[in-house]
């Protein structure tokens, strides 16, 4: 069903909508929604976890509404794999991930390195790395660290920044990008 619905739109047509939206949209969180608006009111996310071996390839939004069952599935998928802790993930972050994915024009799923982090996991990681924030949005279910084999950290960060919808951190030495639905900001090499 998803393939039939999305096949009505040409790649060129979608990119044209994205370009037009990026030009006229104000630099606010709503820009991520604008980048997805021309997609036939269907939003899709593709990810896998190298930590748990799980994968998702799902439509999470149809005709202006998030799908509650998929939201629950994403909460579990993006859990803290170290503690099995689960929180309600902020679905606005999925919108940013999905919009950036579309802008990069890839079919490869994101590799999820970190979604939700329990306070205990965050403290442990913070003790080992100066790159972990004390009040990380990961602990609120508002962030994800992802990687793509077919795109560089710079390419991924540029796509996320084009959404003008949240924080984007580049970690080229570790080969991943942090995307969150907090305030618009950027950091990293």
Image (spheres, rainbow, N blue to C red):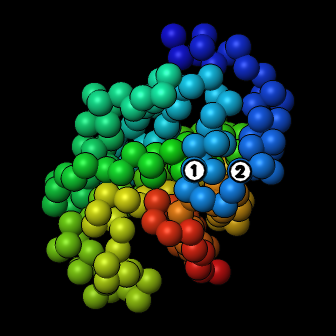
**Crowd tier of the residue under label 2, counting other residues whose Cα lies within 10 Å: few below 14, some 14–19, many 20 or above:** some
Q: Secondary structure at mark 2?
A: loop
Answer with the quarter of the image where residue 159 lies.
Answer: bottom right
Contact between labelled residues 1 and 2, with CB atoms less than 8 Å apart: yes
Q: Is residue 18 left or right of residue 45?
A: right
Q: Residue at x 25, y 49 (%)?
A: 88
Nearer the observer, 175 or 85: 85
Q: Residue at x 69, y 56 (%)?
A: 26
Q: Tell me the residue that label 1 is attached to.
A: 30
Using the numbered discs, state the Cα–Cα distance from disc 2 to disc 1 in whole angstroms.
8 Å
Q: Residue at x 60, y 14 (%)?
A: 5
Residue 15 seen in this snapshot: no
Q: Position of residue 174 (x, y in %)?
A: 53, 72
Q: Secondary structure at mark 1?
A: helix
Nearer the observer, 68 or 124: 68
Q: Is 102 above or below relative to 43?
A: below
Q: Which mark is residue 25?
A: 2
Nearer the observer, 107 or 117: 117
Q: Earlier in the sequence, mark 2 or mark 1?
A: 2
Q: Position of residue 10 (x, y in %)?
A: 78, 22
């Amino acid at each position: 069903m998803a393939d039939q619905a999305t096949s009505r739109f040409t790649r060129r047509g979608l990119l044209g909508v994205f370009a037009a939206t990026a030009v006229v949209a104000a630099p606010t969180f709503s820009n991520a929604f604008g980048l997805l608006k021309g997609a036939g009111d269907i939003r899709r996310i593709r990810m896998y976890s190298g930590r748990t071996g799980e994968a998702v390839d799902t439509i999470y939004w149809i005709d202006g509404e998030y799908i509650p069952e998929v939201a629950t599935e994403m909460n579990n998928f993006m859990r803290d794999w170290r503690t099995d802790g689960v929180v309600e993930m902020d679905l606005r972050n999925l919108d940013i991930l999905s919009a950036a994915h579309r802008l990069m024009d890839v079919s490869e799923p994101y590799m999820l390195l970190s979604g939700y982090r329990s306070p205990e996991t965050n403290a442990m990681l913070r003790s080992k790395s100066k790159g972990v924030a004390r009040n990380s949005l990961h602990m609120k279910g508002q962030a994800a660290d992802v990687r793509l084999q077919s795109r560089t950290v710079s390419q991924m960060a540029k796509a996320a920044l084009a959404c003008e919808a949240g924080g984007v951190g580049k970690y080229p030495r570790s080969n991943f990008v942090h995307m969150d639905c907090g305030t618009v900001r950027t950091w990293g090499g």
